[in-house]
Amino acid sequence: MVHKRKPTIHEVARMAEVGIGTVSRVLNNHPSVREETRSRVLAAMENLGYSPNPHARRVAGGKSYTVSIMLPFVATEFYTRLLEGIEGVLLEERYDVAVFPLLSQSRLERYLKSHTLAYQTDGLIMASFDLSELYPGGQLPTDRPVVLVDAKSPRYDSVYMDNRLGGHLAAEYLARFPGGLYAIKVEEEIDLALSQTVFAERLEGFCDAAAEAGRPLRSGQVFKTRFSAEGGRLALQHFMAQAEPPYNIFAGADLIALGVLEEAEAHSLRIGQDVRVLGFDGQPWTATRGLSSLTQPVEAMGAQAARMLMERIHGYRGTPRAIRFEPTLLERASTGLPTPAYIP
Amino acid sequence: MVHKRKPTIHEVARMAEVGIGTVSRVLNNHPSVREETRSRVLAAMENLGYSPNPHARRVAGGKSYTVSIMLPFVATEFYTRLLEGIEGVLLEERYDVAVFPLLSQSRLERYLKSHTLAYQTDGLIMASFDLSELYPGGQLPTDRPVVLVDAKSPRYDSVYMDNRLGGHLAAEYLARFPGGLYAIKVEEEIDLALSQTVFAERLEGFCDAAAEAGRPLRSGQVFKTRFSAEGGRLALQHFMAQAEPPYNIFAGADLIALGVLEEAEAHSLRIGQDVRVLGFDGQPWTATRGLSSLTQPVEAMGAQAARMLMERIHGYRGTPRAIRFEPTLLERASTGLPTPAYIP
DNA sequence: CTGAAAGCGCTTACAG
DNA sequence: CTGAAAGCGCTTACAG
């Protein structure tokens, strides 16, 4: 496998019989290129298997055509889906993506120093960090455009989920069923200022709405655990030691709800009757497990954030915008919906 | 805060009263620069707050001065520590680091395509992937140097931990105590070919050595769970339902061992007597919890991998090397070692 | 040991 | 609409 040198803009220009300036113009979607010329250049690129050298573009143009995404080092499906959404629109815009999993705050600071890669990019998407806690004034030490996702700030464009509303919907829904109301409180062990509050918000919404429905939760009806399926198992054990079925459980997250399902099965409790459990997130796998869940359009949130960042990069200067997303309750077998007949 | 343009090599040259070529030479540690000249240039850089533009270096020199690290999107302390070790030596060598959390195989392939950032780097460190499963022939589609860490391959330099030995040591140690021998099997849910086998290896080593010691494990003495502290709690519950104390438990990972400790406390079992539990990893926090553990020099493994990669980048062409690291048994209160008196 | 110059692969006014 | 040329901030033979 002999590696011939990558073709450059010059070879493309020669083959398309134009100047290199023109090639550069089609590369950058410059409007003033005749359609006929453009397609000739495009054909030459295709033919040669040409792709522009990003480093050269950065030196010459002062732009990097890449965007940094900073997210907590927390390997949940949420971030996988979020990245999927973000990268989808960025790659379409021919932008590259550099992901920076933040393992600690010292890392954030290093990343933002001028000589590192992260700083050399054209914009920044930060996920799940409360900036006002990280920096006085809530302003990052960068002059590049910034968009927050799964977080809010008066200073930057932000895209966030209304987790409290999700908790509300959960309580209103579960309160309709016979039996006790229960909730699982997920402890967030993220250190430092990288604290997240999503689970706390969901639970608050749940407790508020439960009280409004005349069904306030006592402490025995809330079980605290870390984020794991096994935590859901422990929770159901705990509730079973307190009272008889049926149990109507708001798990706070799909993963936890999965554990509740597993433990219910181990005790031969009837799911959807003795135990009703409601997750949160709407992970793809909940469908096959028949798990009811408050679905989040995570990919859409990511895409939205990416689009707003592109607008900023392209020069938009308006005041910071905040886009709120709402979770949707999806009923399935785990809260009693009959399993639909299989229709081929 | 007015942003003045970053100083370039020209300004440094002028201030140091040398040519730009000389500045470049000290930047690259070229040997033929007089010591007096070098320090004059260094002083000018310091003075101006100069740092080289990495993109320009990449275009001009054809090198990127950055290394890609690919690792599974699994947020355990193991990877935090590994990165710490890798970045330590890389940053010292003035190399930048791009981290690529691999969320799926399709991502790996995209990353390795020629136009993306990952491909533009001078070398690649891959953590925890079994290459032979990912690619036929176990060879990555890149001509850059590659080093594997927490993995092995006949084709590339690799740095790995002898997990089986750790299991052995655990069994030999725990078999000395009165009471039954137990183990926790951690299920690895990593999808696709991104499968990991570390936990399986630890357990195999444990079971082999237990059998050799005349104490083979029956199926009731092994509990299967996902990677979570709550899994450790369930495990102890399970063992308690099988037999009376004492229990000598090999947890397979510190996080799981933590759950065992928590559950033991909840049942007022005496830790170090009724329950002896041994973790794996040697996480920093095990010290304060008095958890005995098989410690892994994770940072050292990372550093070793980084050094080997730098050698390759600098032109070393020898046959692939494999460096094996060994875990060390660290005794603490959780296996009965008396808590040491506090010495101020 | 060191300077001047050519060159890396692009972008972008400047003229036409 | 498009070409020729200057320039981005470096590296690296080439001469001294």
Image (spheres, coloured by chain):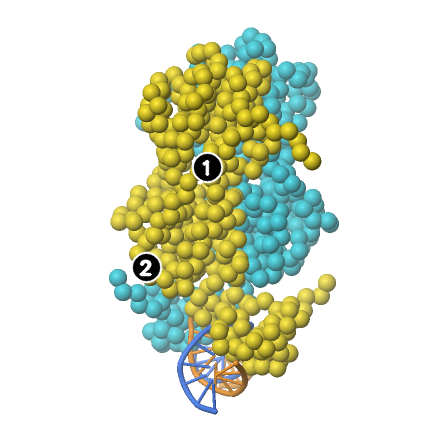
Chain colours: A yellow, B cyan, C blue, D orange
Residue A266 in sight from this viewpoint: yes
Residue at left offset 60%, top offset 20%? B223
Viewer-nearest residue: B35 or A114: A114
Sequence-wise, the earlier of marks 1 and 2 is 2
Instruction: Write down the residue under mark 1.
Output: A328
Instruction: Write down the residue under mark 2.
Output: A318
Q: Position of residue A95 (x, y in %)?
A: 50, 60
- Subunit ID for the residue under disc 2: A
Query: Is the C terminus of chain B in the top left, top right, bottom left or bottom right quadrant?
Result: top left
Q: Nearer the viewer, mark 1 or mark 2?
A: 1
Q: Position of residue B87 (x, y in %)?
A: 48, 49
Vertical order, A206 against B74 (above or below): above
Residue at left offset 64%, top offset 72%? A43
Estimate how packed mark 1 is, as few (under 14), some (14 to 19) or many (20 or more) residues with alpha carbons within 10 Å.
some
Estimate how packed mark 2 is, as few (under 14), some (14 to 19) or many (20 or more) residues with alpha carbons within 10 Å.
few
Residue at left offset 56%, top offset 22%? A262
Tag 2, which secondary structure? loop
- Subunit ID for the residue under disc 1: A
The disc labelled 2 sits on which kind of residue? Gly
The disc labelled 1 sits on which kind of residue? Thr
Tag 1, which secondary structure? strand
**Marking on residue B333:** none
Q: Position of residue A161 (x, y in %)?
A: 40, 41
Residue A116 in sight from this viewpoint: no
